[in-house]
Image (tube, rainbow, N blue to C red):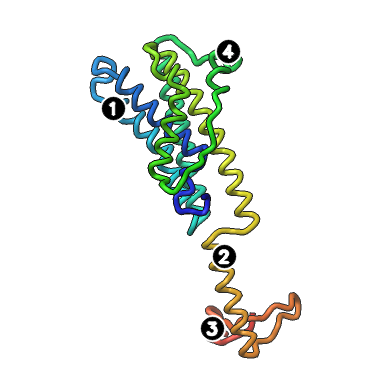
């Protein structure tokens, strides 16, 4: 299952990021009225930050096939977008003299305790992933569908925290995989250098007296010996 090109769809971080996006879109449509957001700018910023969270996880994991560096950069963009969204919801609360629920409050513990199921898709990942995301979101609807914007905002803040936590674990795992096996680009470079060494050895190139590796013929670019070949 995880060997498919859409393997990111099974990641907890991506599933939660989709729940955050759906919850944010609903929140903005319900509470960012023209009286509160006359130009619609806050609506755009919050919904785009939520979209960036899930979209960059998907793109980053897809790009990981060819570049670990690009993958990590995009995952970091996803994390930064979610942090930005966290700030928007925190400001929403403070603008009405409210603050986020304390970490040890019963409400916070209740939202954190909701278990998000691991993905288990069949052959139709596009269909199954959407069904899975909506099923996970429904577990939080007790808070997300509340008429009180303070309750909804607090619940989304906790969902954002859970998503960032899952994303942190994903990035740590990706770094571990890179340390173990490298990335696609890095391995291509390694293969190219090995092929070059094999060709040089076949052509009788001498070995380095210090490390024993096959030396390569290079051209001096500067100084009085510019243009002359030497072994390196």
Label 3, secondary structure: give it: loop
Between residues 144 and 38, which one lies in front from this camera angle?
Answer: 144
Separation (CA) of disc 2 from disc 1: 45 Å
Q: Nearer the viewer, mark 4 or mark 3?
A: 4
Q: What residue do we see at 42% from left, 29% from top?
A: 85
Tell me: 92 left or right of 8: left
Which numbered circle lies on residue 105? 4
Label 1, secondary structure: give it: helix
Tell me: 97 left or right of 109: left
Dot 2: within a 10 Å radius of its alpha carbon, few (fewer than 14), some, or many (20 or more) residues?
Answer: few
Q: Which residue is mark 3?
A: 226
Q: Which residue is mark 1?
A: 41
Question: Where is residue 185 drawn, in percent x and y?
Answer: 52, 62
Question: Where is residue 173 drawn, in percent x and y?
Answer: 60, 46
Separation (CA) of disc 4 from disc 1: 33 Å
Q: Nearer the viewer, mark 3 or mark 2?
A: 2
The vertical placement of 198 against 5, above or below, is below
Q: Earlier in the sequence, mark 2 or mark 1?
A: 1
Position of the C terminus by quadrant: bottom right
Question: Where is residue 13 drawn, in percent x and y?
Answer: 51, 37
Dot 1: within a 10 Å radius of its alpha carbon, few (fewer than 14), some, or many (20 or more) residues?
Answer: few
Between residues 228 and 69, which one lies in front from this camera angle?
Answer: 69
Mark 4 touches mark 1? (CB < 8 Å) = no
Separation (CA) of disc 1 from disc 3: 61 Å
Which numbered circle lies on residue 187? 2
Between residues 46 and 131, which one lies in front from this camera angle?
Answer: 131
Label 4, secondary structure: give it: loop
Find the residue positioned furthest to the right.
210
Dot 3: within a 10 Å radius of its alpha carbon, few (fewer than 14), some, or many (20 or more) residues?
Answer: few
Separation (CA) of disc 4 from disc 3: 74 Å
């Amino acid at each position: 299952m995880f060997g498919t090109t859409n393997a990111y769809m099974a990641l907890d971080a991506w599933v939660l990021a989709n729940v955050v996006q759906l919850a944010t879109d609903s929140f903005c449509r319900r509470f960012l009225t023209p009286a509160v957001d006359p130009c619609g700018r806050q609506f755009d910023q919050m919904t785009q930050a939520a979209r960036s969270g899930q979209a960059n996880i998907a793109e980053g994991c897809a790009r990981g096939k060819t570049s670990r560096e690009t993958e990590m950069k995009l995952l970091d963009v996803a994390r930064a977008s979610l942090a930005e969204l966290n700030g928007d919801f925190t400001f929403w609360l403070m603008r009405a003299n409210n603050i986020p629920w304390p970490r040890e409050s019963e409400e916070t513990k209740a939202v954190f305790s909701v278990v998000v199921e691991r993905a288990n898709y069949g052959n139709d990942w596009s269909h199954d992933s959407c069904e899975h995301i909506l099923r996970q979101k429904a577990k939080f609807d007790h808070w997300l569908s509340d008429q009180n914007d303070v309750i909804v905002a607090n619940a989304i803040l906790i969902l954002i925290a859970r998503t960032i936590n899952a994303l942190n674990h994903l990035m740590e795992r990706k770094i571990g995989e890179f340390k173990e096996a490298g990335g696609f680009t890095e391995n291509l470079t390694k293969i190219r250098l090995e092929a070059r060494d094999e060709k040089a050895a076949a052509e009788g190139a001498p070995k380095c007296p210090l490390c024993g590796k096959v030396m390569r013929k290079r051209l001096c670019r500067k100084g009085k010996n510019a243009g002359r070949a030497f072994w390196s």
